[in-house]
Image (tube, rainbow, N blue to C red):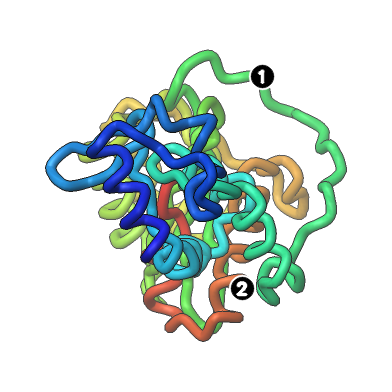
Amino acid sequence: SRQYGKLYNAVRSGVLDSKDPDLKKFNGVFEELYIEDGVLYLGSRVVIPTTQHLRLLTELHYTHIGVVKMKETVRRYFWWPGITKDIEAMAAKCDGCRKYKKKPPPVPLCPWPYARRPMERVHIDYCEYKGKMILVMIDAYSKKIWTRCMMSDTTTYKTLAVLFGWFCEEAGFPTTLVSDNGPQFTSKEFEEKLSKWGVKHILTPPYHPASNGLAERAVGVVKDKLKKMDVSATPVELHIGLAYIGR
């Protein structure tokens, strides 16, 4: 853009024309601007030309990560004058965020002791979304969530295979795993495999889903994100992959 070109040349020359209407908004930050490998920076953040603002915000907002997360992500890596107001305006105009904006949830009772370290206790559950089953796991300490689209295969074998992958490749084996009384979780094979892995398995009481409240909460988060992304007509398969970008 014309403004970016003027600013680039001003930084390169070390002289800012404070009377130029295109440049006066940079008065307060001019000393922090520099050029490296042909790219204009403010501190560690890339200065984005005016013509690219909308494109950048649109791409980031496509996953409906929310205004707070957008601010955190954008301001960490990019900068332009008025960046915060532009992010808020983008979120305010989004049908998905308005339609599925959740009310503050009631504070749930906590039947479990607070976890003291990552993977001390994980909670798992299945949820259904548009005919596809999703395996969900949440770490009680960090609240990190894992998801996997299982299509219609929720067998013990498939469930164990996914859990083993998460434990080996990402998180490490948990001390305790909490689940409901789904058939894949109550099978002899499931119990034997967890025992072999050194994982204590706790089954929540039937007809009392609040006992596995963390898993219920994680399922709610998953479904909420998928619904928001569906407003933008994203294919369901892509929803699963995008739901936890930046998690």
Q: Secondary structure at mark 2?
A: helix
Residue projecting furthest to the top: 116
Residue 82 marker: none
Residue under numbered circle 2:
227
Q: Secondary structure at mark 1?
A: loop
Mark pair 1, 2: CA separation:
32 Å
Left or right of 79? Residue 129 is right
Left or right of 163? Residue 207 is right
User: The residue under label 2 is which amino acid type?
Assistant: Lys
Residue at x 46% of width, y 81% of height: 234
Residue under numbered circle 1:
113
User: The residue under label 1 is which amino acid type?
Assistant: Pro
Q: Position of residue 72 (x, y in %)?
A: 52, 40
Image quarter of the N terminus:
bottom left
Q: Position of residue 44 (x, y in %)?
A: 33, 31
Of the two numbered discs 1 and 2 in the rendering, the one whose residue sits closer to the viewer: 2
- The answer to whether residue 141 is visible is yes
Q: Position of residue 21 (x, y in %)?
A: 55, 53
Residue at x 66% of width, y 57% of height: 220
Confirm or deny contact between disc 1 and disc 2 (CB under 8 A): no
Mark 1 or 2 closer to N-term?
1
